[in-house]
Image (cartoon, rainbow, N blue to C red):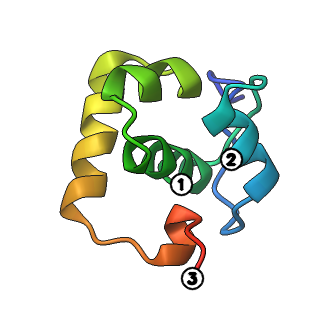
Amino acid sequence: MNANPWLLPEDGIVDEIAVELTVRGVRRVPLTPGERRAAAALILASGGSRYRVARRLHIGHATAKRLAATLTTQPASTHDLGAAA
């Protein structure tokens, strides 16, 4: 049993609607680790802080800090960031 009902197992698919709902803060939705990374990347790319990442993803501040650090050290494709070409 998953201790965190808001963290889904990784399935290799990014649900862009779930990511957008999370980024905009519309409502809380369960995300996979990949979707969390995509949402955090979008929040940070739009000028959001690690604090906003923590609030929108419903994760601790230390977890948000670690996540943000991995995003700044690992290059992401434009698809991962949800950027339009």
- Name which residue lies at 51% across and 17% down: 55
Three-letter amino acid code at the position of disc 1: Ala
Does the rendering let one see residue 63? yes
Residue 6, percent across and down? 69, 28
Residue 37, percent across and down? 48, 51
Three-letter amino acid code at the position of disc 2: Val
Q: Which residue is mark 2?
A: 19
Density class for disc 1 (Cα within 10 Å; few <14, some 14-19, many ≥20) is many
Q: Quadrant of residue 50?
A: top left
Q: CA distance from mark 1 to mark 3?
A: 16 Å
Three-letter amino acid code at the position of disc 3: Ala
Q: Of label 2 and label 1, which has the lower sequence position?
A: 2
Please state if 2 lies on the left or on the right of 83 as rendered: right
Density class for disc 2 (Cα within 10 Å; few <14, some 14-19, many ≥20) is many
Does the rendering let one see residue 58? no
- Secondary structure beneath dot 3 equals loop
The C terminus - image quarter:
bottom right
Residue 28, percent across and down? 74, 23
Q: Which residue is mark 1?
A: 38
Q: CA distance from mark 2 to mark 1?
A: 7 Å
Q: Is 59 rendered above or below residue 84?
A: above
Q: Nearer the viewer, residue 38 or 60?
A: 38
- Name which residue lies at 33% across and 18% down: 61
Q: Which residue is mark 3?
A: 85
- Name which residue lies at 71% across and 45% down: 20
Tell me whether the residue at label 2 lies in contact with that at label 1, contact meaning CB atoms closer than 8 angstroms. Answer: yes
Q: Of label 1 and label 3, which has the lower sequence position?
A: 1
